[in-house]
Amino acid sequence: MKLVNIFLLFFFVLGCNNHIVKREIEIPSSSIEWGVKDEPPSISQCDELSTDVQRKTCFQEKLVELIYNNIDFSKIIVEKQLHDTLLVSLLVDKNGKIFYSGLEISLEIKNQLPKIDSILIKAINNLPKILPATKTNIGVQVSASFDLPLILKTN
């Protein structure tokens, strides 16, 4: 009996010295690399397509369409014709919310449309949530950033 009591006392003393610490899950760096089977961000209409190329093209086209639909072109006035491509950097967080990250733009467009950043930010902030990227080897939804080309053409 004394042996059991000593064992229990020893167990409680050693067990109480370990403070409860919130531990974070560590994911090995090998599982963070983007693989062929991982799923990029998407829109439900595009998920039904059979190939990755079709899904990516569909996603880009639908996203561009949604952005263009959110821009009020009636208030935009330019002095001369423009025909150029903007490269908009976007971030899709793990909840499917889209955020503006930056813009590659020519000097000519920046001079003609000095408020293009705020116009795009407003349009992007009004976008609906989409399906976030998924790391399939660990089954976790993750944030993903990508560049979206937007063609700016005036008549």
Image: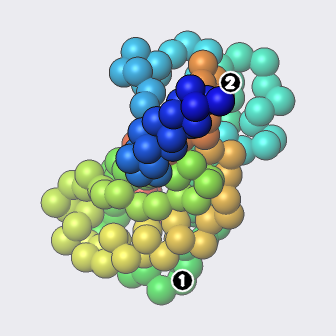
At x 55%, y 13%, the residue is: 36
* Residue 96 in the image, given as x and y percentages of width and height: 62, 53
| Scheme of image coloration | rainbow
Q: Residue at x 79, y 43 (%)?
A: 44
**Residue appearing at x 51%, y 34% in the figure:** 6
1 or 2: tag closer to the N-terminus: 2
Q: Secondary structure at mark 2?
A: helix
Task: From the viewer's perspective, tell me whether residue 80 is left or right of residue 146.
Answer: left
Identity of the residue furthest to the front in this view: 2
Residue 17 position (above or below residue 124): above
Q: In the figure, 81 relative to 91: above or below?
A: below
Q: Nearer the viewer, residue 2 or 56?
A: 2
Disc ID at residue 54: 2
Q: Residues within 10 Å of mark 1 (few under 14, many from 20)?
A: few
Percent position (x, y) of residue 43? 72, 44
Is the N terminus in the top left, top right, bottom left or bottom right quadrant? top right
What x and y, as percent, mark residue 120?
Answer: 43, 68
Asked if residue 9 can be seen in this view, the reply is yes
Name the residue nearer the viewer: 83 or 70: 70
Q: Give amino acid for label 1.
A: Ser
Asked if one can make out residue 53 in the rendered structure from this viewpoint, the answer is: no
Residue 127 is drawn in which quadrant?
Answer: bottom right
Label 2 packing within 10 angstroms: few (<14), some (14-19), many (20+): some
At 53% from the left edge and 58% from the top edge, which residue is drawn? 98
Label 1: state its secondary structure: helix
> Gap between marks 1 and 2, in whole Å?
33 Å
Which numbered circle lies on residue 14? Answer: none
Q: Is residue 135 left or right of residue 58?
A: left
**The disc labelled 2 sits on which kind of residue?**
Gln
Residue 28 location in percent, x, y?
41, 21
Residue located beneath label 1 in the image: 74
